[in-house]
Amino acid sequence: KQEVTQIPAALSVPEGENLVLNCSFTDSAIYNLQWFRQDPGKGLTSLLLIQSSQREQTSGRLNASLDKSSGRSTLYIAASQPGDSATYLCAVSGTASKLTFGTGTRLQVTL
Amino acid sequence: NAGVTQTPKFRVLKTGQSMTLLCAQDMNHEYMYWYRQDPGMGLRLIHYSVGEGTTAKGEVPDGYNVSRLKKQNFLLGLESAAPSQTSVYFCASTGGLADFTDTQYFGPGTRLTVL
């Protein structure tokens, strides 16, 4: 059974810092890995999707890497802003595009 | 283009009552999913569908039923609600691997409380 772990569970950083969120998974037979953002009381918004054949994806200040063989992914956020405060979820895709989620990292960016 | 919508947004039930949650998507996606989100547990898959008229069980299907009579709609039913079904329910859809990105799009969620 696929298991996804995210470390740390919570993180508080001052504005402007670069930060890294970690995700690990136990079964390397994945189709892709997706990073989502969830604001309190809201749904999930897709940030980045990395296909299993890819090493990284970039969108603006976000960069996600994937090492499928070791079962790891990182989400790098450059020059963090208070508006980045949210919970970040990592999910891996298996058959029928079903997602297995980690429990998330709750990020707070302070002024 | 509304994306994925869910009805209702909030609901309070008494133990033993029944209800249906409706999910609709306007992106012509083949695949649709129902997840529940509980504190400390992350999102877990309840049921999913890979096309109109098909349904399959996910990780936590007990106590739920689903139907996909139309491609754009995916219904989640609770026949006899229990307090353990208190949760936030999310619907999602994707074009699957036929869609190059395979990105899943989520609805805003339904917050259900069972007393």
Image: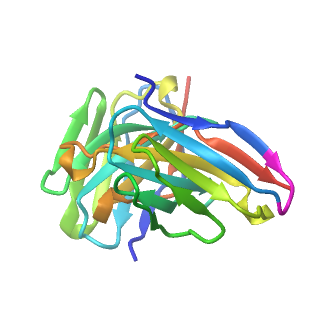
Write down the quadrant of residue A5 in the picture: bottom left
Residue situated in front as seen by the camera: B49 or A90: B49
Task: State left or right for residue B10 relative to residue A9.
Answer: right
Give the residues in magenta: B12-16
Q: Position of residue A37 (x, y in %)?
A: 46, 39
Q: Was residue B13 drawn as part of the magenta stretch in this picture? A: yes
Q: Position of residue A59 (x, y in %)?
A: 26, 31
Q: Position of residue A3 (x, y in %)?
A: 42, 70
Q: Was residue B59 drawn as part of the magenta stretch in this picture? A: no
> Residue at position x 41%, y 50% from top?
B32
A57 is higher (above) or lower (below) than B3: below
Task: State left or right for residue A55 relative to residue B44.
Answer: left
> Residue at position x 21%, y 63% from top?
A68
A6 is higher (above) or lower (below) than A82: below
> Residue at position x 21%, y 60% from top?
A67
Residue situated in front as seen by the camera: B11 or A73: B11
Write down the quadrant of residue B56 in the picture: bottom left
